[in-house]
Amino acid sequence: MKVLLTVHQFFPEHTSGTEVLTLETARGLIARGHQVKVVTSHYRSEALTDDQRFDRYEFQGIEVERLAFSPSPMGGDFNLTRLEYCNPLFAVRFAQIVDDFRPDIVHFCHLMRLSATFVDVCRERRIPVVLTPTDFWFVCPYAQLMLPDHSACEGPDPRGLNCIRHFMHTNRKASMPYALAANVPDLFLRAGLSFVRHNLHLRLRLPGVFRTLGESARAVADRQPFLRERLASMDRILVPNRFMWDVLIRYGMAAERAVLQPFGINLDYQCGVEHTPSKVLRIGFIGTVARHKGAHVLVEAVKQIPGLACKVKIYGRLTDDPDYTREIQSRAQGDDRIQFLGGFPNCEIGRIFSELDVLVVPSIWLENTPLVIYSAQASGCPVIGSDVGGIGSAVAHEQNGLLFPPGDVPALAQQIRRMIEDPEFVKRLGQAARKPVSMQEYCAEVERHYEELTGDPQCAAS
């Protein structure tokens, strides 16, 4: 079969969980005899013309078509808020790619900064489409269901007013009107949205900043119904956990077209790697060094137990969010137990876990299921994780790991103390680790869904 995968960003520049899942899925499908191409995007900070936005390259033998999103008009449209989810220029380019490649199936691993109109392109050509949701992008403009104060969000209200308020708060430093709009009562916000929907902000020839604000607010409000329609039209949705299932059901997912399908990981990277002993508890953080992943929670928790022997190894690129990196390095200053070790290739995951005794996943957002938890379980490494989102679906408290309230520094410190003081408890948790789904098993299941949607006899025979 010919399979077209889409993802919002990809290797070699981007190496987080969704990108790893997409790459390993592509490799797994190729190993099963399929032809795979990836369509991705990347963010460029400089202004670009339309003909500068498209290029292609090859990564590990996989053809990649790349579309550049930047803060400049695309296809004559200046509304970047709308273009993030509805981009006619990118849809035209995607249609060209589809017509040239002629895929049997299109599998969306992410559509942020690409365009949900890719679904329409496939519909017009009667190509089956599959979605693997790796975060909440189809529900939340920021993909994380997190409010500006980093607390959990319950999702968009029917009018999208809370999303508009979040957008205005995020952009409040751009100009005074944004700051004012972030704090007005809902009654005035609804009135303003109605004002914009009737194009009165254009007819009255308001200053440019008010026109831009109005168009952005309308784009935010229109986002949820637009994406709800595309989500409902997916032929198959491979949902990784029950928490994600419950969220998507509320926002348009058709249950009869969805299945629970946990992510798979490449277990080959961890085969034959033996755990090295240590006299002190070695605590690891592996992930994006950004606030929503909560590395600061781990740093603060360790600093609350200064007299206990342990080592903390923080793995993750230190350039993704420089301001946040400087903040947590400053917090860790003076505690030589805490090390910042940067990123590493995914193929090194086995070696990394051979030198860890416990993994901490201190996310403060409504996390999906981080692949690193599966890698930890494959290595028999117990996990201390935030009791939030999909983490609780993979970590059973006091059975194969420990859970704590997200962002609760004292609670995390208590759980770390418990492991430092009871090495046998750590050992028992590690021995009870759940076996994760291998990438071979995962791709076999993905292939089965493809076959059901296309009726491809070669896929069935394989």
Image: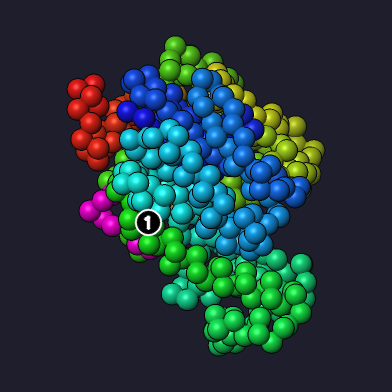
* Residue carrying label 1: 231
State the quadrant of the C terminus: top left
Give the residue drawn at x 51%, y 48%.
92
Task: Indicate the position of residue 43 as horizontal and vertical percent values.
Answer: 66, 45
Give the residue drawn at x 56%, y 73%.
218
Magenta stretch: includes residue 252: yes
Task: Please give the count of numbered marks on the rendered protein.
Answer: 1
Q: Amino acid at mark 1?
A: Leu
For the question of whether residue 401 can be seen, the reply is no
Residue 158 falls left or right of residue 185: left
Q: Residue furthest top?
A: 272
Task: Indicate the position of residue 60 as horizontal and vertical percent values.
Answer: 53, 20
State the quadrant of the N terminus: top left
What is the magenta range? 251-258
Give the residue drawn at x 70%, y 66%.
171
Task: Indicate the position of residue 398 as horizontal and vertical percent values.
Answer: 39, 41
